[in-house]
Image (tube, rainbow, N blue to C red):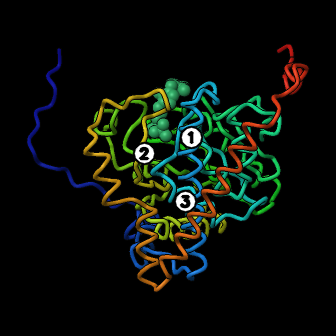
């Protein structure tokens, strides 16, 4: 058998390459959005805009607290995944979108996105309690909400399924030339799925108008990112597909909004997808049936005390000279609105039995 050639360490001189030389920094485009964000991290909101963000975040928080109570009373069947802690993500992103033009798709933790989009809390609460007046006529429940009118494409219970579906929505925007962008939200757990990377490849290749939003709330069902993910910097996960990433503080609504503006400008300019990682935290268990024994109470308390998105917006407002009484009034108004939506949900009729036969797809394949 012939011996392998010995390694001498000497390097043979190669002939000069005829290929055009690569640009000085061919990765520039992958970092340029992050550099832009670092120049000015926070959106320059007017007092009214910041007040609106505060109000919307509070609306989500109070809605979810009430949903938790209704679940405890047995009024909500099936699963119920609360969004408490992550409010700044949905509010910061949704506020930058053009309603009816841009499309949105997410997983089962979907109430907050719909509320941030301005969808009536009454019909969301009615859906949670399985009532006819609910947004999916009471047949979808917490995980399966949908509103064609708002270009809100759900509400998906299968982890990661919304990512390729989101690419389909983006393809439709591109095909129709309607100028819309799709925002596909998913979790850190979903980010480890193969279908996500197949989607990244196609979306980048076809320059689809899509923003991939990874809501890194630090935990998948019961597993922390450190235990489950080899690369915990999720914003880097698109670079192998030449998708620029943005590393965003998901507990600061103004930073979320600023990053979204940067991402939207890039995507609307026909440059293909952007990947945003929003570092956030969920205060509750994965779903209402999760006692969350995989982390300490102290950890949760620490985030609540030192990094809460709503408290942060409140501090900003007070520093701007907005009177505390005005903020208290907002809270009062929201509590009343949520109480009214819970009453509405509890007192609305359930769907008629004949509804079991509508909206059912029966086909042979
Ligand atoms: C394909 C699939 N696998 C497993 C599950 C069960 N499951 C539901 S949620 C979840 C964890 C997802 O975590 P993450 O993507 O981080 O989202 P988060 O709940 O933190 O928002 C799992 C494994 C599922 N619904 N679908």
- For the residue with label 1, is its CB less than 8 Å from the closest atom of ligand 1? yes
Q: Position of residue 69 (x, y in %)?
A: 55, 38
Residue 319 in which image quadrant: bottom left
Judging depth in this view, the residue of 335 and 130 nearest the camera is 335
The answer to whether 306 appears left or right of 57 in the picture is: left
Query: In the orientation shown, which residue stands out farthest toward the bottom?
Result: 321
* Number of the label disc, if any, that sits on residue 58: 3
User: Dot 3 surroundings within 10 Å: few (below 14), some, or many (20 or more)?
Assistant: many
Q: Position of residue 201 (x, y in %)?
A: 55, 44
Report whether the residue tagged 2 is closer than 8 Å to ligand 1: yes
Residue displayed at 52% across by 69% down? 328
Which quadrant holds residue 362?
Answer: top right
Tag in front: 3 or 1: 3
Q: Are marks 1 and 2 in contact (CB under 8 Å)?
A: yes
The reply to whether residue 195 is in sight is yes
Q: Callout 1: helix, strand or loop? A: loop
Left/right placement of residue 290 relative to residue 184 reads: left
Q: Is residue 167 left or right of 226 when viewed as pictured? A: right
Q: Which mark is residue 109?
A: 1
Q: Earlier in the sequence, mark 1 or mark 2?
A: 1
Reply above or below: 154 against 303.
above
Q: Are marks 3 and 1 in contact (CB under 8 Å)?
A: no
Is the residue marked by circle 2 packed among few (<14), some (14-19), or many (20+) residues within 10 Å? some
Name which of mark 3 and mark 1 comes first in the sequence. 3
């Amino acid at each position: 058998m012939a011996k392998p050639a010995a390694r001498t360490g000497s390097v043979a001189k190669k002939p000069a390459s005829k290929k055009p030389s690569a640009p000085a920094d061919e990765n520039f485009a992958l970092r340029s959005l992050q550099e832009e964000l670092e120049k000015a991290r926070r959106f320059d909101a007017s007092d009214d805009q910041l007040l609106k963000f505060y109000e919307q975040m509070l609306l989500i928080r109070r809605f979810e607290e009430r949903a938790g109570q209704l679940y405890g009373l047995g009024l909500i069947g099936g699963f119920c995944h609360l969004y408490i802690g992550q409010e700044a993500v949905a509010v910061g992103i949704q506020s930058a979108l053009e309603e009816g033009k841009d499309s949105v798709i997410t997983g089962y933790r979907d109430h907050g996105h719909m509320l941030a989009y301005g969808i009536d809390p009454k019909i969301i609460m009615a859906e949670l309690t399985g009532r006819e007046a609910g947004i999916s006529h009471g047949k979808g429940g917490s995980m399966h909400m949908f509103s064609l009118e708002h270009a809100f494409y759900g509400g998906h219970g299968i982890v990661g399924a919304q990512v390729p579906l989101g690419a389909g929505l983006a393809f439709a925007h591109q095909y129709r030339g309607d100028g819309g962008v799709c925002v596909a939200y998913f979790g850190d757990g979903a980010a480890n799925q193969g279908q996500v990377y197949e989607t990244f490849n196609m979306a980048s290749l076809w320059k689809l108008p899509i923003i991939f939003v990874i809501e890194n709330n630090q935990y998948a069902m019961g597993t922390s990112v450190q235990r489950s993910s080899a690369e915990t910097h999720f914003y880097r996960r698109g670079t192998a597909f030449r998708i620029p990433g943005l590393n965003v503080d998901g507990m600061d609504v103004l930073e979320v909004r600023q990053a979204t503006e940067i991402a939207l400008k890039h995507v609307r300019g026909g440059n293909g997808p952007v990947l945003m990682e929003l570092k956030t935290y969920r205060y509750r268990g994965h779903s209402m049936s999760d006692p969350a024994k995989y982390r300490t109470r102290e950890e949760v308390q620490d985030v609540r005390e030192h990094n809460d998105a709503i408290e942060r917006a409140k501090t900003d407002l007070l520093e701007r000279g907005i009177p505390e009484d005005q903020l208290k009034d907002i809270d009062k108004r929201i509590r009343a609105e949520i109480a009214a939506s819970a009453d509405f949900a509890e007192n609305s009729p359930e769907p008629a039995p004949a509804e079991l036969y509508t909206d059912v797809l029966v086909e042979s394949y």
